[in-house]
Image (cartoon, rainbow, N blue to C red):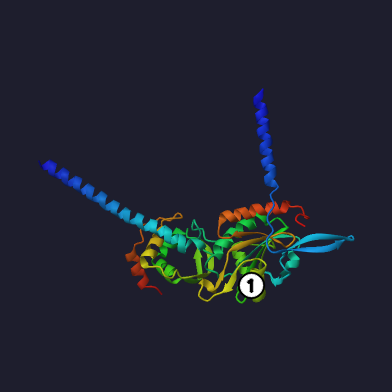
Amino acid sequence: MKKPAYLFLGFICLCACKFNSSNKTLPIYGNRTAVTKMVNGQVVNDTTYATIPPFKFVDQYGDSTGSQNLAGKIYVADFFFTSCPSICPIMQRNMLAVYKAYKDTPDVKIVSFTIDPKYDTPPVLKNYAEKLGVTGNSWLFLQGNRDTVYRIAEKNFLVAVSKDSTAAGGYVHQGWFVLVDKQKRVRGSYDGTDPKQVAQLIDDIKTLKAEPAAAGK
Amino acid sequence: MKMKVICSICALLVILIISCQSSDSLEFNRYYAEGSVVYQTHCQNCHGQHGEGLNGLIPPLTDSVFLRKNSDQLPCAVMFGLKGKITIGKRLFEGQMPPASGLANIEIAQALTYITNSFGNKMGIFNVEMVNGDLVKCR
């Protein structure tokens, strides 16, 4: 008679665990500031989080693409260049896993910014995307003004990039995959050269998708 | 008496052959093991853990026919890189392979022994003498 009771207890514990894990929330990165504002005649304290500022670049199809196309979407950003001999191939190999997982999900995108805009023109980027096996609009390869790309990389996406003639390929950059939520806030940073962290990223996108729109506000 | 001598000579011969083979395979194993480390640090980033390449961007190392046919060109490709069009596994690749600068001839030999005996390839040892000979003829 007692055994079923124990089983039942065990089952409840398991349920509790599961419930907790599905309730997991991702941290919000960047500086935050407290704002005091008037709402309906009352003084309210609110927190504003660091967000990715607006940008407007050109994608691999030659179309103007920018933050307005990514509004209300979850996206993963990385910084690369097509002639990169060092960590890019392994990064893009891992990013392909993200692409395969979410290419049919309209509100999840991948954005690869080139840090060599002089060479990586839209035709070069399109050729690269095709050879990588990427079609459609779910993975965008963007060419933008060099200084702007470098600035948002370092200040907003928190990825260090720089030109260095002594490095292989002429540029040094970090291989972070940066996860941005629908409110343009950075929610995660993953080592793009490590398949385990990329698997975590694929998982975290699910968590982010399940997050209610008003969460964290 | 005669029988004994013949027998012992035969036995000696057998031992000799076996020991020769094992020293050969010992050398192969040494090249292969060292080569896997060279491959990991200098080749795997682009060509992948299983020599699979990267879709249409980076050719795979699984085309045994190509490797066998161009085996004398392989050391030059590793040492000085590759540029232009290349057909591997019925697919056309176009781009650039950077030179693996700073590799010693012996390391090239070890890496090539690893590559040409992994990923479904089986070409036997690629020793340093072969690499030395091929490198002189690089175009």
* Amino acid type at mark 1: Tyr
Which residue: 70% across, 43% down?
A19
Query: Which chain is indicated by disc 1?
Result: A
Q: Where is residue B111 in the image (x, y as percent from the top left)?
A: 41, 61
Looking at the image, which is closer to me, A146 or B59?
A146
The N terminus of chain A, quarter of image: top right
Q: Where is residue B88 in the image (x, y as percent from the top left)?
A: 50, 63
Which residue: 24% across, 50% down?
B17
Most extreme residue toward the top, as rendered? Answer: A1
Which residue: 32% across, 56% down?
B27
Q: Can residue B123 be seen in this view?
A: no
Q: Mark 1 points at which residue?
A: A150
Q: How many marks?
A: 1
Looking at the image, which is closer to me, A79 or B30?
A79
Looking at the image, which is closer to me, A49 or B19?
A49
Q: Is residue A206 visible?
A: yes
Would residue A183 be found to the left or right of residue A40 on screen?
left
Element type at marker 1? helix
Q: Position of residue A170 (x, y in %)?
A: 54, 74
Most extreme residue toward the right, as rendered? Answer: A41
Q: Position of residue A57 (x, y in %)?
A: 70, 72
Near mark 1 (Cα within 10 A), the count class, few <14, some 14-19 or many ≥20, is many
